[in-house]
Image (cartoon, rainbow, N blue to C red):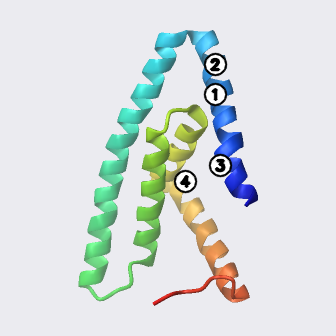
Amino acid sequence: MRYLFLVIVIIPAVEIALLLLIGQTIGAFPTMALILLTGILGAYLAKQQGLMAIHKVQDLLSRGMMPGDALLDGVCILVGGTLLLTPGFVTDVTGFLLLFPITRTYVKQWLTKYFKKRMDKGTITIIR
């Protein structure tokens, strides 16, 4: 619940404060242009990285291998692309970090450890 509170209340408040601060610093039109530019660039990167992830999953499946890492790539790309389409600078930075393969590697390592830890504790239930 505490993370849901963070996402719903605190992040939008920080985004609004940053938008106002940057708008006062560089002006309203450059701020809007920056937001539009990151959205367009984010959509392009998400499409490019998403297609690469889909091809990687298909390739691994055709060879009879489990595409676990490629699926995590896909999840990170989906979340990153969504964050980049959301107006704001904090979400944009987070979205770009999830789209670039170099930084996405660290996020995937963290997610793997997180899910493994939860599975070892028995707090994750897999429904078939």
Residues under numbered marks 1 and 2 in contact, where contact means CB atoms less than 8 Å apart: yes
Secondary structure of the residue carrying tag 3 is helix
Disc 2 to disc 3, how far (Cα)?
Answer: 19 Å
**Along the line of sight, the residue nearer the viewer: 30 or 13:** 13
Which residue occupies 26% across, 75% down?
59
- The kind of residue tagged 4 is Thr
Q: Name the residue beneath numbered marker 3.
A: 7
Q: Which label number is shown at residue 16? A: 1
Image height of 110 relative to 48, above or below: below
Q: Residue furthest right?
A: 2
Q: Name the residue beneath numbered marker 4.
A: 103
Circle 4 Cα neighbour tier, 10 Å, few/some/many (<14 / 14–19 / ≥20): few
Disc 3 to disc 4, how far (Cα)?
Answer: 21 Å
**Circle 1 or circle 4, nearest the eye:** 1
Image height of 53 relative to 31, above or below: below
Disc 1 to disc 4, how far (Cα)?
Answer: 26 Å
- Residue 19 is situated, as x and y percent measured from the top left of the image, at 60, 23
First of labels 4, 2 by sequence position? 2
